[in-house]
Structure formats: C-alpha cells, structure tokens
Amino acid sequence: MKILRIIARLNVGGPARHVVWLTDRLTPLGYDTTLIAGTVPDGEEDMAYFAAENGVEPMYLREMSRELSAKDAVSIFKVFRAFRREQPNIVHTHTAKAGTVGRIAAFAYKWLTLGTVIGKPRKLKVVHTFHGHVFHSYYGNLKTRIFLTIERVLAAVATDRIVVISEQQLDEINGRFGVGRREKFAVVPLGMELEPFAASVEKRRSARAEFNATDDQFVVGFSGRLTEIKDIPLLLSAAKICVEAEPEMNFRFIIIGDGSLRTELESLADTLEISNYVVFLGSRSDVANLLSGLDAFGLTSKNEGTPLSLIEAMAAGVPSVATRVGGVRDLLGASLESNSGYEVCERGVAIDSRKPEDFAIGLLYLAKNKRIQERVKNEALAFVRERYSIDRLVSDIDGMYRELTTRP
C-alpha cells in the first residue's frame, strides 16, 4: 500500500517523531511510505537527524513553511506532482499547514486530473491528524477565524478520516469549534518507544551530576521548544515564588530545549534574580537520560494536543505538575483532591489558572508530599505503558488504513 505522508516541518517536538516512527515501523507491514516535509525556520531546531537515525529519507519542500505565504501555491503544485508520480492509496497529513497544502492538492488530484471521468474521482483516501490546533492562543481573532474556516471546509469536502490524539481534543475540535462531522473522527493516542525512558540509579546519578544538583535538592524540569505557546515565563515566575517561599527545599530548575525565546528567557531569569537556581541546557538528544535526574516535571503550556514531553516524563517515572489544557486533561486523569489553586489527579497535579502563584503552590505541594509523588508516579507509569507504546500506535494506524481502503 502506497502512503504519502506530509508534515509542515521536522522541527523538535512530538509530531516530527510521530511521522518518522510511522514511516519506519509501517514498512514491515507492507506499506511503502514517502515522507514530505517543509522547511524548519530560523530559530527552531531541525530534527532531520532523527529521520536519518531511523533510516527515513524525507522529500523536502523548501516552499512549505508554517506561516501563510504566496509560496503555498507552489507547495500545492509540487505536492500535486508528487501525487501524479507516486499514485498513493492514502495521503496522510500532519499539522495545520501540511493539512491545508496536502488536502487541497489531494482534492485536485482526485477530481481535476486530466483523464478522470466526471463523477468518478481517483481512488485516494485522505487522512489528517490534529497533533494540536491553532484555534486559540496562537494568533489574533481575524487570523484564527480564517484558519478555522479553512479547517471546516477541508474537513467537509477533502478529508475521509480526521484523527485526534485524545478525547479532550475531539471535544474541542469537533464539539467546541465545529470542525467536521463526528463520524469522520478517530481517536488514536500517540505512541512512543518507552524502553529508553526506563529509570535507573545510574541514569539518575549521571543526570544530576550534569545538573550540578545534590541529593537534597528538589529538581524541577521542562523539556520542549522555547516558544510562546509553552509559556516558560510562567514557569520561571513560579520558580521565583518557590525559591523565596521555601528556601529549605533547595529547588533547582532545568530547562531542556532551545528556541527563539532562549535569550529572552535567560534575561528574564536574571531579572527575577533566580539565575543561580535555573539551568538552561539547550537542545539535547539524550532527553531520556536527563529526565531520570528530575524530581518533578513542569508544563505551563497555553495550548496542547497531547504533549509528548509529558508522556516521556511519565514514562521516566517523574511526577508532573501541568496546566490542564487540551490533551493534558486525559493524561492527568480524574481529580482526586481539589485544593485552592491546584488539583491532585490520578496521574499528576493539575493547574487550571495561569497565575504563577497557583503553579507554585502545586509544585510546593508535590515537593512536600513523598506519598503523593509515589502514587501519581506509579499510576502514570502504568498508564503510559498500557496506552502509549509504539506497537499500539502502529497497530491502530494499520487497522485504520486497511479499513479505509477496503470500504467503498
């Protein structure tokens, strides 16, 4: 079965890993996949190395970038030509820009190609995966409305299956924002290689040595892109409150990742007078090992699909404190205990506000409660092993592709 998989860019993050894993792991099941990727803009890290490590050679489309551009017409034409050349059974797009470019090109290929008979389109199934969405917290009202209108039209006329990665995301995209008919949706949770994240005494000792952290320090970490949507200033502001409120806890904060805001965030740490407590490690390929050195994981995002970084922390046995946005709700689970500013959930501590003091209170609560740390850590680890393995992801996608291509 021939698959054409398209993603806007292979930048650092869960979607890039997702498309590379699928491209690689579906091959033994009889799939021939061509991966098309756009360009990674300045200020973002390129994950082309990850594709190479997995034996995947993408076809790069330099005209395709994240923002709207006149070059999008060129991207659509080039993707259309790729359809003519590859003649795929399925096109599967990932992320918003690739979803727009790929589905417009697919619609043209199905209906407008010279030689097709009117009313009998080419046999091509179109799948789009929402890894997140841009319907709030990214752009202003006008641009957001434009993007939402585009998604509604594409869902109606150019998509056979819409994949979301959590039940909460389904409720948002279909229920709240009115994209697509419910019957077109499938919930397919993310999958990942879990084994590298297994904790060990040796990995923890090595990571904490790199953090320059002693055994008595409580180390809070973040891993991901340093961009506006992750709201690292909120984490740094909460860090200041923790450091000043409980100096005996000996907090240390580790920021793993890079991005356009790194210099600004380092300056903010200086302004907040917490530079001695915060370490910026930059981009790292050994995140699985570094997570072993953390006592807690902090996620302060304004908007998320299902954050792979949080799943990785859970797989590493690190309890988390996270803003309850998007798919984070499904990861943390049901509320067990409600308190002022935070809630203790089955698999982590949830923060519903964007107040630094609330995030700090949640962190302080977790840091002081060893029993809660162990409980949410064990629940999270069992949950991830059951739900987020790479084998389960590949099986789900394989089943969906076969169902799509066997029905009329």
Image (spheres, rainbow, N blue to C red):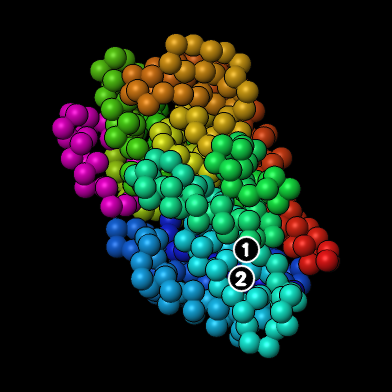
In magenta stretch: residue 262: yes
- Helix, strand or loop at disc 2? helix
Whether label 2 touches label 1, CB < 8 Å: yes
The x and y percentages for residue 158 are: 62, 63
Q: Where does label 1 land, which residue?
A: 158
User: In this view of the protein, which residue sits in the foreground, 53 or 166?
Assistant: 166
Residue in the image at 33% along x and 37% along y: 232
- What label sits on residue 261 in the rendered view? none
Sort mark 2 into few (<14), some (14-19) or many (20+) by Cα contacts within 10 Å. Answer: many
Q: Quadrant of the N terminus?
A: bottom right
Is 186 on the left-hand or right-hand side of 71?
Answer: right
Q: Where does label 2 land, which residue?
A: 107
In magenta stretch: residue 293: no
The x and y percentages for residue 336 are: 61, 16
Residue in the image at 68% along x and 34% along y: 382
Region of the chain picked out in magenta, as a range: 255-278
The x and y percentages for residue 268 are: 20, 36
The x and y percentages for residue 384 are: 64, 39
Q: What whole-number distance in Å separates the C-alpha atoms at marks 2 and 1?
A: 6 Å
Is 24 on the left-hand or right-hand side of 303?
Answer: right
Residue in the image at 65% along x and 76% along y: 111
